[in-house]
Image (cartoon, helix red, strand yellow):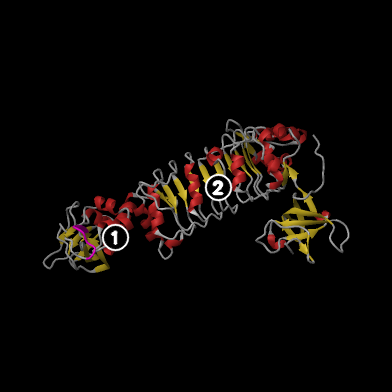
């Protein structure tokens, strides 16, 4: 079927020739850049027809659609002062159809020898099929290549339209994965044609395209199902609005994974969210402009949601949850929040109430400023006992012990004289840590002071200030490194050894009390430092 040439239209994505010249393989070529046509018509005091364009690379622009005080068109990039230009039609080049782009990528531009040696495709049974295009049979063989294609990647191609009805389904019927990112596509209505053309499609990526969603209103308002077998839709950086995408997703019965990064989304409110996105398991919303946790809470009703990426947004805090005030998100296993502006460790405490959470990422959040990577990692680990992966790496049992001992020591240091209930309010993991690392000493203080009523339990002074030295031998006691540390008197020897090994980066350490007559080795792993006779101000010797 021959496609009717309608000429360049407003809102169409085109290639524009620039004055730049680049050299490739010894040849000089004109540089072509992507742009969107915003205006076609006359310009005051100029002859002929001009095309007003908005460049993808805004730095090439000369104005914002206004010339000599007259506004001819508006640019979409309102946050950029000058991303537009006027050019003649001879500098414009239209894009190609989907099948033309596929032929160029997979069948053109290489010699028959290259094709014979290097080119292959995956068949529907996942076998490698060598491709040889030679002689008079090349066209037939090219068609056989296209018919077997399952995964097609056209990132950065000159594609701007799907083409005549039936051509795609006839030429490339087996495509299940299709990457159309950074092309010249500008209309969802055009993309939606693939629903009929490629019924096997499972993954579709149209990221970094300047989609004019308003121009696709008739298609967007339709109610019928589309893309029956599509499981993953990627719409990163394509000016998508949340409400619009929710409506589209609700028409895709098999959709489980949705990517919407970089779309300047502020709110996640829409009608019938559960109906539209109730089957979504993976949702990527990174690099948007969501600042209020109340917007994130809207997603808590999505009972199938297992992974949520909110990195690079503007979140400043998280709701405070408790056993009585649960967060929802019943299936959520993975949560990414890196690069937000969370202010407090209390925000981390909140995630312990996410019952299915196994992995979290919180790097580069504001509350971690001033902490080194190890200290911030251990701080998060100690507060989230159910999480098994942090910032992309597995939490080891040793890390868990080190983190919890360190956190408990920190709590005890700052909590001398405080009431237990006040400590638990600030440190929700306190009671659990005490149970794991033996009970602290307790003093019962009789009432009598201002505001007191009856008995209350407070933290006794249970920290031992000791000097820990890594020595070369017990004879000389010459220290290689010495560290001063305050340790809980109830700390068990086996836990203390783990801490020592981390501090000095050694393994298999033996620990001794430095006594005047002879060093005394600490032997009973389950005994506490207090039970082993360690006292305030003593020197402990470590031999590795």
Task: From the viewer's perspective, tell me whether residue 282 is left or right of residue 211.
Answer: left
Is residue 360 shown to the viewer in this render? yes
Q: Mark 2: which secondary structure?
A: loop
Measured from the top left, where is residue 38 in percent x and y?
Answer: 76, 54
Q: Which mark is residue 121?
A: none
Q: Which residue is mark 2?
A: 269
Task: From the viewer's perspective, tell me whether residue 451 is left or right of residue 338.
Answer: left
66 in magenta: no
Rendering quarter of residue 463:
bottom left
Task: From the viewer's perspective, tell me whether residue 202 is left or right of residue 157.
Answer: left
Report, in whole angstroms, how far the alpha carbon at label 2 lies from the one at label 1.
40 Å
Number of residues whose C-alpha sits closer than 10 Å to that of mark 2, classed few (under 14), some (14–19) or many (20 or more): some
Above-or-below relation of 295 to 486: above
- Foreground residue among 106 and 500: 500
Q: Mark 1: which secondary structure?
A: helix
Measured from the top left, where is residue 91 in percent x and y?
Answer: 80, 55
Image quadrant containing the C terminus: bottom left
Q: Residue at the location (53% across, 54% down)?
A: 290
Main secondary structure type of the part rendered in magenta: loop
Is residue 402 shown to the viewer in this render? no
Q: Residue furthest right?
A: 47
Question: How many numbered circles does the render carry?
Answer: 2
Q: Which residue is mark 1?
A: 411
Q: Which residues are magenta?
A: 450-457
Number of residues whose C-alpha sits closer than 10 Å to that of mark 1, classed few (under 14), some (14–19) or many (20 or more): some
Depth check, mark 2 against mark 1: the one in front is 2
Image quadrant containing the N terminus: top right
Look at the numbered discs 2 and 1 and tell me whether their residues touch, using CB distance below 8 Å. no
Q: Residue at the location (48% across, 48% down)?
A: 297
Measured from the top left, where is residue 396 in percent x and y?
Answer: 35, 50
């Amino acid at each position: 079927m021959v496609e009717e040439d309608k000429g360049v239209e407003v809102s169409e994505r085109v290639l524009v020739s620039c004055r730049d010249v680049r050299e490739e393989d010894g040849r000089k070529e004109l540089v072509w850049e992507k742009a969107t046509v915003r205006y076609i018509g006359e310009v005051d005091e100029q002859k002929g027809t001009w095309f007003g364009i908005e460049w993808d690379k805004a730095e090439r622009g000369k104005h914002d659609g206004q010339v000599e005080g007259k506004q001819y068109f508006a640019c979409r990039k309102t946050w950029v002062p000058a991303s537009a230009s006027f050019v003649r039609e001879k500098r414009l080049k239209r894009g190609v159809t989907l099948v033309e782009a596929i032929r160029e990528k997979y069948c053109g531009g290489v010699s028959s020898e290259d094709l014979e040696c290097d080119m292959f495709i995956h068949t529907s049974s996942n076998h490698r099929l060598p491709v040889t295009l030679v002689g008079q049979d090349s066209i037939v063989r090219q068609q056989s290549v296209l018919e077997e294609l399952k995964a097609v990647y056209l990132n950065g191609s000159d594609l701007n339209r799907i083409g005549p009805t039936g051509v795609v389904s006839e030429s490339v019927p087996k495509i299940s994965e299709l990457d159309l990112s950074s092309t010249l596509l500008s209309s969802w209505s055009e993309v939606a044609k693939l629903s009929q053309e490629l019924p096997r499609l499972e993954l579709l990526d149209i990221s970094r395209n300047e989609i004019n969603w308003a121009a696709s209103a008739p298609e967007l308002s339709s109610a019928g199902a589309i893309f029956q077998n599509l499981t993953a839709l990627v719409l990163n950086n394509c000016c998508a609005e949340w409400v619009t995408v929710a409506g589209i997703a609700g028409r895709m019965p098999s959709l489980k994974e949705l990517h919407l990064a970089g779309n300047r989304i502020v709110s996640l409110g829409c009608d019938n969210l559960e109906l539209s996105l109730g089957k979504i398991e993976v949702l990527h919303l990174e690099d948007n402009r969501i600042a209020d946790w109340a917007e994130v809470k809207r997603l808590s009703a999505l009972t199938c949601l297992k992974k949520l990426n909110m990195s690079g947004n503007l979140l400043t805090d998280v709701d405070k949850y408790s056993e009585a005030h649960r967060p929802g998100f019943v299936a959520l296993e993975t949560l990414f929040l890196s690069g937000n502006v969370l202010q407090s460790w209390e925000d981390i405490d909140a995630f312990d109430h996410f019952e299915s959470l196994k992995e979290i990422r919180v790097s580069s959040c504001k509350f971690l400023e001033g902490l080194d990577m190890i200290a911030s990692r251990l701080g998060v680990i100690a507060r989230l006992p159910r999480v098994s992966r942090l910032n992309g790496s597995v939490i080891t049992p040793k890390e868990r012990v080190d983190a919890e001992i360190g956190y408990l020591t920190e709590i005890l240091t700052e909590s001398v004289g405080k009431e237990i209930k006040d400590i638990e309010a600030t440190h929700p993991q306190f009671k659990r840590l005490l149970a794991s690392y033996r009970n602290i000493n307790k003093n019962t203080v009789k009432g009598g002071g201002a505001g007191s009523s009856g008995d209350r339990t407070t933290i006794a002074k249970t920290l031992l200030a000791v000097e820990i030295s890594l020595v070369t031998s017990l004879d000389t006691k010459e220290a290689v490194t010495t560290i001063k540390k305050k340790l809980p008197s109830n700390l068990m020897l086996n836990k203390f050894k783990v801490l020592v090994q981390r501090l000095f980066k050694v393994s298999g350490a033996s620990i001794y009390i430095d006594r005047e007559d002879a060093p005394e080795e600490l032997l009973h792993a389950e005994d506490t430092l207090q039970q082993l006779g360690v006292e305030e101000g003593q020197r402990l010797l470590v031999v590795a």
